[in-house]
Image: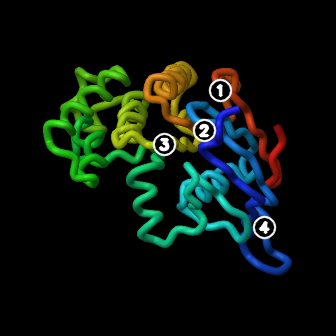
Amino acid sequence: MKNPILSVRQVSRTFGAGATAVAALQDVSFDVEPGTMVALVGRSGSGKTTLLNVIGGLDRPDAGTVELDGSEITALDEDGLSELRRDRVSYVFQTFGLIPVLSAAENVGAPLRLTRTPAADREQRVRLLLDLVGLAEHAEQRPGELSGGQQQRVAIARALAASPRLLIADEPTGQLDAETGRSVMALLRGVVESEGVTALISTHDPVMMAMADRVIRISDGRLHE
């Protein structure tokens, strides 16, 4: 077995206090091997999004630790978390999250501007990624000129721009029709293999579960494999 790229240990997260407290995560522990695609499955309110937010440094647990590549995310200060999200973890959201006034190419290149990647290298990486997601001919179009599926493909390309170690996708096909959703799922499967990225994807879709290397189920804040 390879050394895990991600290690989650006894993570708990509670919202509220007293009689109204909600235990979103309860003593969650698991490892993920590098270069794998893991489907995180559970009903609405099961704790999926909370778990993804804790792993990605968007939220802090009440107890437990999360390590990525041997670095303890849960011990990082705000500067460390900003660096983590800039360099090692990327997100794909259900709502795409593209910048409306920028073209597809400019959206994809935005993370590389933050890392001050030289213009020639940035442009080359953007071309490669737009080609990878099948949108090379749409580079100059803005999000409003693209379909939902095309916008999600741009979002995936943007998430890959800085060559992250971990890609987190929270219900990435939730706003897409079934056929478009399947094509986006197949794309995610392909980029895991071609880019060597590790992906943690929350989903309800059985097609995505079938494509994943591993399925982890979560219910009432607890994991079941």
Q: Nearer the viewer, residue 152 or 188?
A: 188
Amino acid type, callout 3: Arg
Depth check, mark 4 against mark 2: the one in front is 2
Residue of label 2: 201
Under tag 1, what secondary structure? loop
Please give left or right for residue 71 compared with residue 105 in the image.
right
Residue of label 4: 22
Colour mode of the rendering: rainbow
Please give left or right for residue 67 compared with residue 191 in the image.
right
Q: Nearer the viewer, residue 57 or 67?
A: 67
- The Cα atoms of the two marked residues, 4 and 2, are separated by 23 Å
Under tag 4, what secondary structure? strand
Q: Give the class, few, some or many, for how many residues have Cα within 10 Å of label 4's Cα (few <14, many ≥20).
A: some
Percent of width and height locating residue 18: 83, 80
Depth check, mark 2 against mark 3: the one in front is 3
Q: Is residue 35 visible?
A: yes
Residue of label 1: 212
Depth check, mark 3 against mark 1: the one in front is 3
Depth check, mark 4 against mark 3: the one in front is 3
Amino acid type, callout 2: Ile
Depth check, mark 4 against mark 1: the one in front is 1
Q: Are marks 2 and 1 in contact (CB under 8 Å)?
A: yes
**Residue at 49% across / 21% down in the picture?**
190
Q: Quadrant where the C terminus lies?
A: top right
Percent of width and height locating residue 166: 52, 43
